[in-house]
Amino acid sequence: MKAIVKKLPQKGLWLEDVPVPKVGPNDVLIKVKKAAVCGTDLHIYKWDEWAQQTIKTPLTIGHEYMGEVVEIGNEVSRVKVGERVTVEGHIACGFCRNCRRGRQHICDNTIGIGVNCNGGFAEYISVPAKNVLHVDTRIPDEILSIMDPLGNATHTALSFPLLGEDVLITGAGGPIGAMAIAVCKFAGARNIVGTDISKYRRDLARKMGATKIIDPLNDSIEEAKKRLGMVGGFDIGLECSGSPVAFNDMVNNMYNGGKISLLGLLPKSTQINWGKLIFKGLTLKGIYGREMYETWYHMEMMLLTGLNITPVITHRFHYSEFQKAFDIMEEGNSGKIILEWD
């Protein structure tokens, strides 16, 4: 079969012929129909410091995808051949303390599909049946293929109550920040202010329903608050940029008692004014993946009752043109990019 492989420990990806994966007794084989490129895939492509420390080559990458079940293991009963499915990308052990208290998303022994084991940028993928998800047929294939990052956005946004609250989103034009805008609006936030230094992505954030989007290099969050008639600061902060400057701007503009979801991966060198965190009484919550499997339920119900994230999909390519997708991603001029495998 064809697969997009991190073949060598250097920048780039390779389209390779690899064996069709075997199906274990508790696994299912999925014929991939659509996959989506993630920021994590771009890190692997660029072979940055994180990738060098994490990825063992050769590796088939990709963890956002959907497809059709074509084979099941002899111990599998809840998944049938012919079903349309997607997959939770974190394989939890099921036995550590967190797994046994219903917190599988922070399992002690998590294995990431497409990161720690072969992923879904391939014609076929074998995954544990427990990770397979059936989603309502009214949700289109393309949306099904990006449920993984929508889950990150949903987990980030819904970690704290949003109804009537003022929300600040940094990195608001990136795919997850943009989808978080839509979730916040759907959940009843009052003002949703986003920041992004990319004009392309600021335009995308506006399409997703933000109240106001600003370029932090040329405008201030403080001025945006004044224009909106806000008193004090933001009740909720969603940090999706990974930028120390953006994070400090967020802390400076939070209302006393505010709550911040941290999705963006801040560098080790990040410095913050701890006094402001303490004296403002702020709450910080680290966000990793999706809460398994409550976030999946939230996503499905929102999509079925009016949540629209379609504008976040900006490009589509056949998998053989994956280089074009990564070139556009590297430039920063895209939302979600779909790779067609069917």
Image: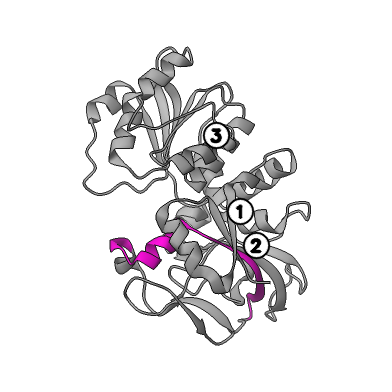
Question: Is disc 2 surrounded by few (<14), some (14 to 19) or many (20+) residues within 10 Å?
Answer: many
Q: Amino acid at mark 2?
A: Thr
Question: Is disc 3 surrounded by few (<14), some (14 to 19) or many (20+) residues within 10 Å?
Answer: some
Disc ID at residue 147: 1
Q: Which sits earlier in the primary sequence, circle 1 or circle 2? A: 2
Q: Which sits earlier in the primary sequence, circle 2 or circle 3? A: 2
Residue 156, horizontal then vertical, whole percent: 49, 41
Q: Amino acid at mark 1?
A: Met
Q: Secondary structure at mark 2?
A: strand
Q: Determine the residue positioned at 38% across, 39% down.
A: 197
Between the C-alphas of marks 3 and 1, the distance is 21 Å
> Do the residues bearing badges 3 and 1 touch, measured as CB atoms within 8 Å?
no
Quadrant location of the C terminus in the rendered image: bottom right
Residue 41, horizontal then vertical, whole percent: 44, 63
Residue 158, horizontal then vertical, whole percent: 55, 37
Q: Which sits earlier in the primary sequence, circle 3 or circle 1? A: 1
Q: Amino acid at mark 3?
A: Arg
In the visual, does 110 lie left or right of 154?
left
Q: Relative to the observer, which residue lies in front, 189 or 37?
A: 37
Disc ID at residue 86: 2
| Above or below, comparing residue 289 to residue 207 in the picture | below
In the visual, does 92 lie left or right of 6?
right
Q: Secondary structure at mark 3?
A: helix
> In this figure, which residue is indicated by the disc labeled 3?
206
- Mark 2 against mark 3, which lies toward the viewer? 3
Q: Determine the residue positioned at 50% across, 63% down.
A: 325
Disc ID at residue 67: none
Question: Is disc 1 surrounded by few (<14), some (14 to 19) or many (20+) residues within 10 Å?
Answer: many
Q: Which residues are magenta?
A: 25-50
